[in-house]
Image (cartoon, rainbow, N blue to C red):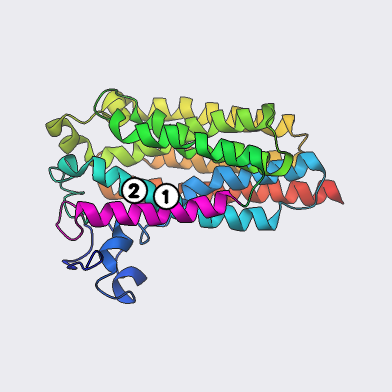
Amino acid sequence: MIFSTKDTGPVADAVKKHWVDTSLPSSLRPFARLARWERPIGWWLLLWPCWWSAALAAIAAGQGWPNLWHLALFFIGAVAMRGAGCTYNDLVDVDIDAQVERTRSRPIPAGQVSRLQAKVFLFLQAMVGLIVLLQFNTFSILLGIVSLLPVAIYPFMKRFTNWPQLFLGLAFSWGAFMGWAAEFGSLSWAPMFLYAGGICWTIGYDTIYAHQDKEDDALVGVKSTARLFGTRTKPALIVLYALATLLFATAAVLADAGPAAFIGILAGVIHLGWQIVALDIDDGDQCLRLFRSNGTYGWILFTGFVIDAFVTWL
């Protein structure tokens, strides 16, 4: 059977005692781990640019709140496409993952899921994403299809450039276009600046994440901004997060946002500053915690944008 698997235990850095490991049938757990369902931070990071964009579009359109149907679709699409992206990434990186301590227990290198099973699972998740995409207007559908290009090339970049996090940003920030396009059927400068800010933010948080693997990455020849920046990571994060903040603020100005949006952006600066001050690049567990805290940063910005849309509407 295609979906017959052997559960040999959770991935090394997975969330402990997650519902995946306590509630799912053992035959489905490897697929859930392949899609990273036990690590929701990934789809939150993919979702936030979508929701930020939808909230900015609501401000620009003079609506009291983002389109709730669009928010729900983005949520489902983010979970499905993040899972599909992780499955694709693991298929591409199986040889590398088998050599890295943190990733060798992933379902494919651990032998829990075969390559054929992973490909079938990838197809099913992509179909869910396609169904979601088809609910939007034609312009958004075409824009979503184009997003597959940065998604497809990202897993290979760690072999050729010290900036694979840049390519992750190109893929993960695409939602900055989607929320706006879903509302207006076109793009403008506001989502462009939001997208650029999202790229800087992504490079920053994924640099923190990549510090967990820098020793193994050096041994197997994998490149990253964590290895590139090294002991200069904190100054680099200051530049990246400052640029992200400036670009997000510019997007808000172009969307004709009011004070609440900028209060949210300022509160976000405090959170990002805390990440930089607290960071110990040689503490892998702390790097993971700080990386996950970017889900909170997403809520901060989104809350500011939503409050601003409501206040402006009043």
Secondary structure state at the residue bearing disc 1? helix
Q: Residues within 10 Å of mark 2 (few under 14, many from 20)?
A: some
Residue beneath label 1, please? 82
Secondary structure state at the residue bearing disc 2? helix
On the picture, is 134 further left or further right than 152?
Answer: right
Task: For residue 260, say whether it is visible.
Answer: no
Q: Which residues are magenta?
A: 108-134
Considering the whole magenta stretch, tell me its main secondary structure: helix
Which amino acid lies under the numbered mark 1 shown in the image of this protein?
Arg
Q: Residue lying farthest right?
A: 314
On the picture, is 301 further left or further right than 12?
Answer: right
Tell me if residue 198 is in the magenta stretch: no
Residue in view at x 47 percent, y 47 percent: 45
Residue in view at x 73 percent, y 30 percent: 253
Residue beneath label 2, please? 86
Residue 66 is situated, as x and y percent measured from the top left of the image, at 71, 51
* Separation of marks 2 and 1 at Cα, in angstroms: 6 Å
Q: Are marks 2 and 1 in contact (CB under 8 Å)?
A: yes
On the picture, is 241 further left or further right than 228?
Answer: right
Give the camera-side residue of 306 and 79: 79
Which amino acid lies under the numbered mark 2 shown in the image of this protein?
Cys
Give the camera-side residue of 299 and 98: 98
Residue 305 is situated, as x and y percent measured from the top left of the image, at 69, 45
